[in-house]
Amino acid sequence: MLTVGIVGPESTGKTTLAKGLAEHFNSIWVPEYAREFLSDLGRPYNQEDLISIAKGQLDAERKARRQAKDSLFLDTDLFVIKIWSEFKYGNCDPWILQQLSMNQANLYFLTHFDIPYEEDPLRETPEKRPELFHLYEQALKESGVLYAVIQGDERERLETAIQKVNSIL
């Protein structure tokens, strides 16, 4: 099964791309668990909460793998939690790093910040999207995973991503 992780700064079209790819390839996508977790939390989150978010994300991915056929699309994965933890707190829990090393996608799409920012109460740093993008790209390069930068309008992004997935399938 081909697993595609979609990562990038907030408000860069990850969810839209995951949904579009799942629809095109008649498959399923895994939503970002952090949204559910934070919406239900009832208090400001802290660094320790990132472990719970990582566990919830991995659990959602495992459940989705049982239903998926040829491909699975992840609207975020542990790379996002790693980068955010390092950006916000200066470090990342070793458990998250270990799980990331054992649960990497076959292909990553890094969504560019070239689309308008959309306000959302769960988003924190609209002005930091360029800086975060570069942190994601550096982490993907250092990890040695296969990745592609996805940019342009919604149609261009989906077409580029479909071509990349088809080149692997």
Image: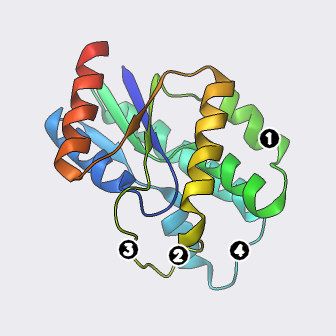
Is tag 1's residue or tag 2's residue first in the polypeptide sequence?
Answer: 1
For the residues carrying marks 1 and 2, which lies nearer the camera in this image? Answer: 2
Residue 8 vs residue 70, the one in the foreground = 8
Q: Position of residue 47 (x, y in %)?
A: 79, 64
Tell me which amino acid carries mark 3. Glu
**Which secondary structure lies at badge 2?**
loop
Number of the label disc, if any, that sits on residue 95: 1
**Which secondary structure lies at badge 4?**
loop
Is tag 1's residue or tag 4's residue first in the polypeptide sequence?
Answer: 4
Q: Could you tell me how many numbered marks the image carries?
A: 4
Q: Residue 104 occupies which quadrant of the picture? A: top right
What is the spatial separation of the Cα atoms under label 2 and label 3, in whole angstroms? 11 Å
Residue in view at x 23 percent, y 52 percent: 153
Is tag 3's residue or tag 4's residue first in the polypeptide sequence?
Answer: 4
Q: Residue furthest bottom?
A: 42
**Residue picked out by circle 2:** 122
The answer to whether 131 is drawn above or below residue 128 in the figure is: above
Instruction: Let me know if residue 102 appears in the view.
Output: no
Q: Position of residue 155 (x, y in %)?
A: 16, 47
Residue in view at x 70 percent, y 34 percent: 99
**Residue picked out by circle 3:** 118
Residue in view at x 51 percent, y 58 percent: 33
Residue 152 vs residue 56, the one in the foreground = 152
Instruction: Give yes or no for contact between labels 2 and 4 (Cβ–Cβ under 8 Å).
Output: no
